[in-house]
Image (cartoon, rainbow, N blue to C red):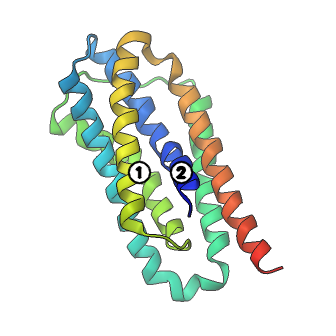
């Protein structure tokens, strides 16, 4: 996977965390650099950890799915993307706590990175250095989440659904790209 595709994947995966960070910034009111860094670290760490775990699961399954791994990557990324798009269309608003405690941040970090676990399984089907990929995903998520806190403290939650929609579309497009590239190699 090239740097451009990896960057797009990282941005797509980080959109859930970015959306939650925006609402966290709104709940916090006036954001501080410390608060932005804490939120960025939580989300960045888990967005890096989950695809690494998924990758190792994918490697264990690779012998069984080698013939159709491109379809697995496509289906997983498309399913995550469709879920994010559906969530962006939901009218249900969740109340966000301003707390940055472990009790508050841990469930948010895990919940926003579950899609990254499935993406890690998809990454097992693509050639590349997984450690570079997960570090890159973590750094992108850190910066977007830290920025999201600041944006949320200024603009509120009005960009949350747009971020989730964009992330969903990006993940579907990456899944389609993996599928089409693999099918073109067979031609």
Near-viewer residue (31 or 128): 128
Q: Is 123 situated left or right of 68 in this image?
A: left
Considering every residue shown, the one lying at the far bottom of the view is: 63
Considering every residue shown, the one lying at the far front of the view is: 3
| Quadrant of res 180 | bottom right
Query: From the viewer's perspective, is residue 130 above or below residue 67?
Result: above
What x and y, as percent, mark residue 139?
A: 35, 46
Q: Is 172 situated left or right of 129 in this image?
A: right
| Quadrant of res 170 | top right
Q: Is 78 situated left or right of 9 in this image?
A: right
Query: From the viewer's perspective, is residue 71 above or below residue 77?
Result: below
Q: Is residue 178 visible?
A: yes
What x and y, as percent, mark residue 149?
A: 34, 23
| Residue at horizontal 61 percent and vertical 36 percent from the top | 166
Marker disc for residue 167: none
Q: Are marks 2 and 1 in contact (CB under 8 Å)?
A: yes
| Residue at horizontal 61 percent and vertical 34 percent from the top | 165
| Residue at horizontal 35 percent and vertical 49 percent from the top | 138
Please tell me which of labels 2 and 1 falls first in the chain: 2
Tell me if mark 2 has few (under 14), some (14-19) or many (20+) residues whose alpha carbon lies within 10 angstroms of its own.
many
Circle 2 SS class: helix
What x and y, as percent, mark residue 96?
A: 33, 24
Q: Quadrant of the N terminus?
A: bottom right
Q: Which residue is disc 2 drawn over?
A: 9
Q: Which residue is disc 1 drawn over?
A: 137
């Amino acid at each position: 996977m090239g740097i451009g595709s990896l960057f797009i994947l990282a941005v797509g995966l980080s959109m859930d965390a970015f959306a939650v960070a925006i609402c966290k910034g709104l709940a916090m009111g006036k954001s501080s650099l410390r608060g932005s860094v804490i939120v960025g670290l939580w989300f960045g760490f888990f967005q890096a950890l989950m695809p690494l775990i998924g990758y190792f699961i994918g490697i264990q399954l690779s012998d069984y799915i080698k013939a159709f791994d491109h379809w697995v990557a496509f289906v997983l990324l498309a399913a995550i993307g469709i879920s994010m798009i559906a969530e962006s269309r939901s009218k249900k608003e969740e109340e966000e706590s301003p707390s940055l405690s472990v009790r508050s941040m841990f469930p948010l970090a895990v919940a926003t990175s579950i899609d990254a676990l499935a993406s890690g399984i998809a990454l097992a089907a693509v050639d590349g250095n997984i450690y570079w990929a997960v570090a890159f995903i973590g750094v992108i998520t850190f910066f977007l989440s830290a920025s999201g806190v600041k944006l949320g403290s200024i603009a509120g939650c009005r960009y949350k659904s747009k971020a989730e929609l964009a992330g969903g579309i990006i993940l579907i497009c990456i899944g389609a790209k993996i599928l089409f590239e693999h099918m073109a190699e067979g031609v």
